[in-house]
Image (cartoon, helix red, strand yellow):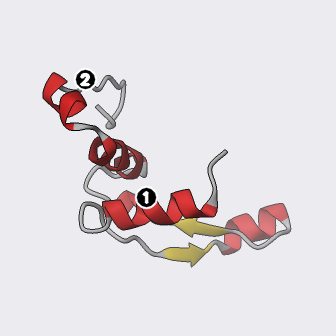
Amino acid sequence: MVGVEDLESAAARIAGHVVRTPTLPSPGLTALLGVPVTVKLELLQRTGSFKARGAVAKLLDLTDEQRAAGVVAVSGGNHG
């Protein structure tokens, strides 16, 4: 189970490697769903998506041995 401490640790590790993106209220989705909705503008990342956060966090967690073995990324979109 991922806890708050895990998220805070990952956020600290990836700082400086990804853009800190803003959140904005979404009046349209709020009206449609009947609950307050906030969106995070991850389209401002260089990749145009949130995927950089998880990829960078994982790459920074690799051991020296794992890093030396290399990484292969496969994606039908912008993640690879």
The N terminus appears in which quarter of the rendering? top right
Instruction: Point out which mark residue 10 bears.
Output: 1
Label 1 is placed on what type of residue? Answer: Ala
Label 1 near label 2: C-beta < 8 Å?
no
Residue at 56% x, 63% y is 5
Percent across and percent down for residue 49 are: 39, 50
Quadrant in which residue 43 is drawn? bottom left
* Residue in the image at 45% along x and 75% along y: 22
Residue drawn at x 36%, y 49% as measured from the top left: 57
Tell me the distance, in whole angstroms, between the alpha carbons under discs 2 and 1: 21 Å
> Callout 1: helix, strand or loop?
helix
Query: In the image, is 1 to the left or to the right of 34?
Result: left
Q: How dense is the environment of label 1, judged by Cα within 10 Å: few (below 14), some, or many (20 and up)?
A: some
Q: Residue 56 location, x and y as percent? A: 31, 48
Secondary structure at numbered mark 2 = loop
Which residue occupies the foreground of this view, 71 or 41? 71
Tell me which label, 2 or 1, sits earlier in the chain. 1
Q: Measuring 70% from the left and 69% from the top, which residue is drawn there?
A: 37
Q: Which of the two residues, 33 or 18, is positioned nearer the viewer here?
A: 18
In this rendering, is residue 20 above or below 44? below
Horizontal side, residue 10 vs residue 31: left or right: left
Q: Which residue is mark 2?
A: 72
Q: Position of residue 31 (x, y in %)?
A: 79, 70
> Which quadrant of the structure image shows residue 21?
bottom left
Q: Quadrant of residue 65?
A: top left
